[in-house]
Image (spheres, rainbow, N blue to C red):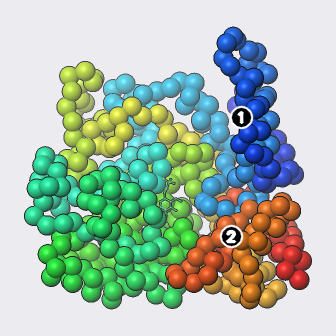
């Protein structure tokens, strides 16, 4: 009964958000002034505070679960995943060691194994939930470095025989720059490979750069292919990258933070062909799998390499199992870990694989509707992807002022994006399973009115 109430509450909130504004109109000072009433000098009634927080969240945030939030991979959330967050918080299991939380660890393992199989990874692959895509990508770089340079773990980068280099395109996620900084290999270790006219990695340029860098004394060790780039939704040529990496003995990582969910859809999964050959994969449940933040996933074909990268021994943790179980604190970045995976497990169990596929395919279809509606009213489409992300423009359009007008009138939330060295254009992504054809037609009609 409590669960049914929670589901109805989530649905009611979604309806209320859909009929309200998308963007807030507030200054930092207004919020700070409001918060002055909370000096924590004495207790307050929880109901009152919770109601006030909810009012603040409704009035003073961009409503990313709004059906006309056409934004940055931030999803609407399934009711089952909201319920899972509450359950996880109430029981607060500690997943660092298997012995402490056998049920929670096995639920995560079960969920990750299901998705690993969808990607076509072997059953011995290792996977863990992460805070998000950045932690998963960081895990990939640490494991790849450890495998390529065995001395990295004990001696650090200062003892490496040559400077390590990672290959990706300018369309890959910019978090890799921070990762290069954090891992000590330095931002210059990121080598930018050219893209083709669809913003996909140019395999010829990759091959040229790796060979040139080797001649210059660098040590190439990793290639990152993106399955659904943040700016344009491009999918790098994964099968070609897999073959190249195999022939050059390079670690092949696929950043499928957003696009990885396409693996669940019979209609879309073919676009990820080649991902099954990856050494590691990043996929975020808190993007197209529509669960609340933060829920990333890191998959690694080489369980032994991940175990080597994150190995640690202590006397204070519960003793190890018999080898049939894994203690996540010894195979991944995090130590204390919350029950991240429950929200994906519960949503999958509730909707079923076919329900999930329908949700993902609905969004892909809404992307097609958006593309066609824009095209038929004279907008130019500037990217090509089977995923629901559209980059578009109109001649002589001043993008920043157009977006300001769009936001001020609460028509939709969209972002600007620069394609290559070109001017800013508009970017709209279907991130909500609640976005309908009616929403899209209305948004396009209003945009046409704004530009006429
Ligand atoms: C392709 C890609 N990779 C990685 C990330 C980083 O993921 P997170 O924000 O979950 O850390 C993003 C974020 O949008 C992304 O689009």
Q: Label 1 neighbourhood size at 10 Å, few (<14), some (14-19), many (20+)?
A: few
**Residue named by callout 2:** 428
Residue 330 in the image, given as x and y percentages of width and height? 27, 38
Quarter of image, res 73: bottom right
Rendered residue at 21%/36% (across/down): 312
Front in this rendered view, residue 6 or 181: 181
Asked which secondary structure carries label 2, the reply is strand
Up-down relation of residue 114 to residue 381 (above or below): above
In the shown orientation, is residue 43 left or right of residue 146? right
Q: Residue at x 29, y 79 (%)?
A: 243
- Residue drawn at (43%, 46%) of the image: 130
Label at residue 32: 1
State the SS at label 1.
Answer: helix
**In the image shown, does 228 or 82 lie closer to the viewer?**
228
Q: How far apart are the two marked residues, 1 and 2, measured between alpha carbons?
A: 32 Å
Q: Position of residue 320 (x, y in %)?
A: 23, 29
Q: x, y percentage for residue 403? A: 75, 69
Residue closer to the observer: 123 or 74 = 74
Q: In the displayed structure, would residue 73 be above or below residue 322?
A: below
> Measuring 86% from the left and 50% from the top, which residue is drawn there?
20
Specify whether 138 is left or right of 143. Answer: right
Which image quadrant: the N terminus?
Answer: top right
The dot on residue 342 is none
Residue 282, percent across and down? 42, 58
Is residue 147 visible to us here?
yes
**First along the sequence among labels 1 and 2:** 1
As displayed, is residue 190 above or below residue 248? above
């Amino acid at each position: 009964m409590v669960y049914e109430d929670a589901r109805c509450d989530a649905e009611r909130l979604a309806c209320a958000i859909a009929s309200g504004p998308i963007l807030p109109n507030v200054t930092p000072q207004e919020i700070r002034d409001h918060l002055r009433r909370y000096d924590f000098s004495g207790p307050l009634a929880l109901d009152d505070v919770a109601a006030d927080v909810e009012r603040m969240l409704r009035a003073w945030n961009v409503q990313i679960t709004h059906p006309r939030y056409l934004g940055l991979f931030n999803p609407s959330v399934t009711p089952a995943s909201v319920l899972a967050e509450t359950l996880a918080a109430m029981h607060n299991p500690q997943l660092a060691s298997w012995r402490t939380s056998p049920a929670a660890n096995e639920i995560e393992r079960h969920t990750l194994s299901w998705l690993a199989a969808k990607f076509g990874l072997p059953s011995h692959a290792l996977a863990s939930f992460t805070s998000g895509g950045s932690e998963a990508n960081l895990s990939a770089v640490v494991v790849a470095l450890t495998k390529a340079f065995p001395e990295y773990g004990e001696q650090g980068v200062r003892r490496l025989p040559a400077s390590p280099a990672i290959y990706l395109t300018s369309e890959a996620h910019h978090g890799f720059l921070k990762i290069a900084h954090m891992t000590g290999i330095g931002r210059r270790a990121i080598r930018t490979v050219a893209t083709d006219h669809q913003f996909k990695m140019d395999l010829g340029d990759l091959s040229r750069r790796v060979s040139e860098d080797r001649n210059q004394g660098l040590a190439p060790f990793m290639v990152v292919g993106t399955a659904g780039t943040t700016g344009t939704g491009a999918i790098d040529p994964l099968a070609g990258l897999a073959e190249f990496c195999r022939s050059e003995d390079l670690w092949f990582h696929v950043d499928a933070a957003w696009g990885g969910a396409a693996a669940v859809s019979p209609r879309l999964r073919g676009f990820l062909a080649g991902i099954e050959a990856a050494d590691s994969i990043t996929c975020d449940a808190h993007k197209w799998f529509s669960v609340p933040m933060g829920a990333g996933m890191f998959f690694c074909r080489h369980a032994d390499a991940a175990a080597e990268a994150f190995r640690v021994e202590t006397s204070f943790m519960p003793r190890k199992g018999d080898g049939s179980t894994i203690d996540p604190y010894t195979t991944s970045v995090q130590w204390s870990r919350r029950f991240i995976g429950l929200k994906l497990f519960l949503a999958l169990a509730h909707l079923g694989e076919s329900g999930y596929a329908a949700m993902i395919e609905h969004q892909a279809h809404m992307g097609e509707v958006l593309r066609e509606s824009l095209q038929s009213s004279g907008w130019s489409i500037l990217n090509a992807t089977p995923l629901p992300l559209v980059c578009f423009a109109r001649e002589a359009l001043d993008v920043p002022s157009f977006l300001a007008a769009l936001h001020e009138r609460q028509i939709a939330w969209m972002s600007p994006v620069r394609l290559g060295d070109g001017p800013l254009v508009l970017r709209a992504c279907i991130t909500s399973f609640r976005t309908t054809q009616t929403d899209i037609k209305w948004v396009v009609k209003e945009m046409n009115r704004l530009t006429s």
